[in-house]
Image (tube, grey):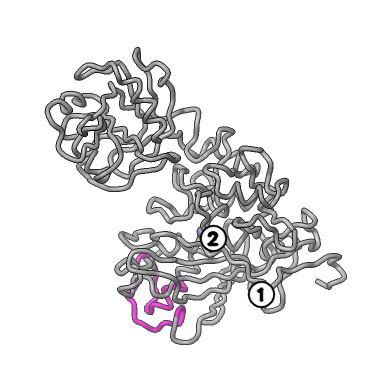
């Protein structure tokens, strides 16, 4: 492509590398993979002896026939490239500059990898929208010719070379290099690669989520579909200050692209819910948003339903359930749903104590202000469902329990789902984006919400239930890329 063909060609300033430092929490030469739909070329950027060139002997694992660590890494890359190559359509081969290098980690958490567009372009030939940044690989697809600077890959991807191999870098939790998802307690590299490649293909904004500033005052194609669900204005229609504010607003941003939005109702499951009803419920009656527990059975159908009874084991009238329940509290919760307060001991201890006393479910009321949050922990002997409600909701519910007897309250708690709301979607049925209240560089805004059910590939953390799917009916990664032009 000649410069004359491009009336206004611009490139990202200062270094040109725009990387989403996607901090997944916990979390050779050129090899070509040819496909019917798109060709992805892995460009090995490691020096001899390290990364893809690491000669450490390795036994073939999970369908990966490599016999050195370097060969196995490369094979896993090809497997992920094959999946994206079979999904995308482009006449221009997509080059991924890839390397394994030391990345941030300690004994309990690590950055698994990061990736992003190497260059961004606006106003190239056939650009669907004028004055809009597109990632290099997408701009090349849309232009029908390679727009990248000579010798430059479209995507830069780096992965943690020390993961699981050293005591100071998640010891024992290394990358699983097999391609069959039989990863056990390890981290499935192919899944991480699919995630990071998606960032490089355009699953990211180039606008700063921290300040709302656009590079050279030019919006990203992403920003036409990122919508503030309080104002219903997209980021393109918002001021920089509004963009920055929305990036740290709980459940504040949604994706309004047509492909994703059309799939949301059939893809996301109903939202977990606490319903309060009964003769004594009074003004507390209604549906409550809940934080889910990582222990016990998931909420679903049939719902768990019973009298809601508070545990009262503290002098101030609250109940922590951190010790085995006394006779009065055991009588109160037996066959009923126990209401306990957050604090002092972990959630699993509370659940075990109320379960041992015969409760059929547990509602935890928060002990400080804030939005709904989940509960972590694990215990395979827990068979009752648990949910967490906000401090404010807990207070409203408790107010309805004043005139209870020793084992009845007249207030019915139903732990189930709200069929009219989808897990991870806003009230209009659009999927939420990741907007934690504390800004997370590289993660905020450029991921889906962590509340989606089933878990999505493009959440900020890799979940163990992910498949290698990147499109419907399981996953919304490719549909989003379609929304921006793929
Ligand atoms: Zn990411």
Residue with the most extreme front position: 316
Which SS type dominates the magenta stretch? loop
- Locate the N terminus and report the quarter of the image it occupies: bottom right
Residue range corresponding to the magenta coloring: 51-75
Residue with the most extreme top position: 279
All told, the count of numbered labels is: 2
* Image x and y of residue 152, in percent: 66, 76
Task: Give the number of the mark in front: 2 or 1.
Answer: 2
The disc at residue 15 is 1
Relative to 33, 307 lies left or right: left
Q: Quadrant of residue 380?
A: top left
- Residue 141, compared with residue 245, is above or below; it is below
Question: Residue, x 37% and y 32% (percent of image)?
Answer: 300
Does the beta carbon of the residue at mark 1 sit less than 8 Å from ligand 1?
no
Residue receiving disc 2: 441
Instruction: Give me the C-alpha separation between circle 2 and circle 1.
Output: 18 Å
Residue with the most extreme left position: 327
- Residue 138, compared with residue 323, is above or below; it is below
Q: Earlier in the sequence, mark 2 or mark 1?
A: 1
Query: In terms of secondary structure, where does tag 1 sit?
Result: loop
- Locate the C terminus and report the quarter of the image it occupies: bottom right
* Image x and y of residue 326, in percent: 13, 31
Viewer-nearest residue: 178 or 324? 324
Label 2 environment density (alpha carbons within 10 Å; few <14, some 14–19, many ≥20): some
Viewer-nearest residue: 359 or 282? 282
């Amino acid at each position: 492509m000649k410069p004359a063909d491009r009336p206004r060609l611009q490139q990202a300033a200062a270094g040109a590398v725009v990387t989403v430092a996607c901090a997944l929490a916990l979390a050779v030469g050129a090899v070509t993979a040819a496909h019917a739909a798109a060709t992805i070329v892995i460009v090995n950027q490691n020096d001899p002896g390290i990364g893809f060139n690491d000669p450490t002997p390795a036994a073939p694992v999970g369908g990966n026939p490599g016999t050195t660590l370097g060969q196995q890494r490369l094979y896993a890359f090809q497997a992920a490239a094959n999946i994206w190559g079979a999904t995308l359509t482009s006449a221009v081969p997509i080059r991924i500059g890839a390397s394994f290098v030391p990345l941030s980690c300690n004994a309990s958490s690590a950055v698994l990898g990061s990736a992003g567009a190497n260059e961004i372009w606006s106003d190239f030939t056939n650009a669907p929208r004028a004055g809009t940044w597109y990632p290099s690989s997408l701009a090349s697809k849309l232009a029908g010719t390679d727009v990248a600077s000579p010798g430059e890959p479209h995507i830069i991807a780096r992965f943690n070379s020390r993961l699981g191999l050293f005591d100071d870098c998640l010891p024992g939790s290394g990358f699983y290099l097999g391609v069959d998802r039989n990863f056990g307690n390890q981290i499935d590299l192919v899944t991480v690669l699919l995630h990071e490649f998606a960032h490089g293909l355009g699953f990211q904004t180039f606008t700063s989520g921290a300040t709302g500033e656009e590079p050279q005052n030019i919006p990203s194609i992403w920003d036409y579909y990122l919508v503030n669900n309080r104002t219903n204005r997209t980021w393109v229609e918002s001021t920089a200050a509004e963009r920055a504010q929305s990036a740290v607003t709980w459940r504040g941003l949604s994706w309004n692209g047509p492909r994703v939005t059309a799939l949301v109702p059939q893809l996301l499951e109903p939202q977990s819910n606490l319903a309060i009803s009964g003769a004594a419920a009074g003004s507390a009656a209604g549906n409550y948003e809940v934080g889910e527990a990582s222990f016990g059975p998931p909420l679903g159908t049939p719902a768990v339903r019973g009298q809601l009874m508070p545990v009262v084991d503290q002098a101030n009238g609250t109940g922590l359930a951190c010790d085995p329940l006394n006779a009065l509290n055991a009588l109160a919760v037996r066959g009923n749903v126990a209401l306990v307060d957050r604090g002092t001991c972990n959630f699993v201890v509370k659940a075990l104590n109320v379960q041992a006393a015969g409760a059929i479910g547990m509602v935890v009321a928060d002990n400080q202000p804030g939005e709904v949050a989940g509960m972590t922990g694990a215990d395979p002997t827990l068979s009752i469902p648990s949910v967490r409600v906000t401090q404010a909701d807990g207070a409203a519910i408790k107010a309805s329990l004043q005139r209870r007897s020793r084992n009845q309250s007249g207030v019915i708690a139903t732990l189930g789902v709200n069929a009219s709301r989808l897990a991870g979607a806003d009230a209009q049925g659009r999927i939420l984006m990741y907007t934690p209240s504390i800004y997370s560089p590289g993660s905020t805004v450029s991921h889906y919400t962590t509340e989606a059910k089933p878990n999505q590939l493009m959440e900020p953390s890799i979940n163990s239930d992910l498949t290698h799917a990147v499109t419907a009916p399981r996953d919304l990664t490719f549909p989003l890329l379609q929304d921006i032009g793929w």
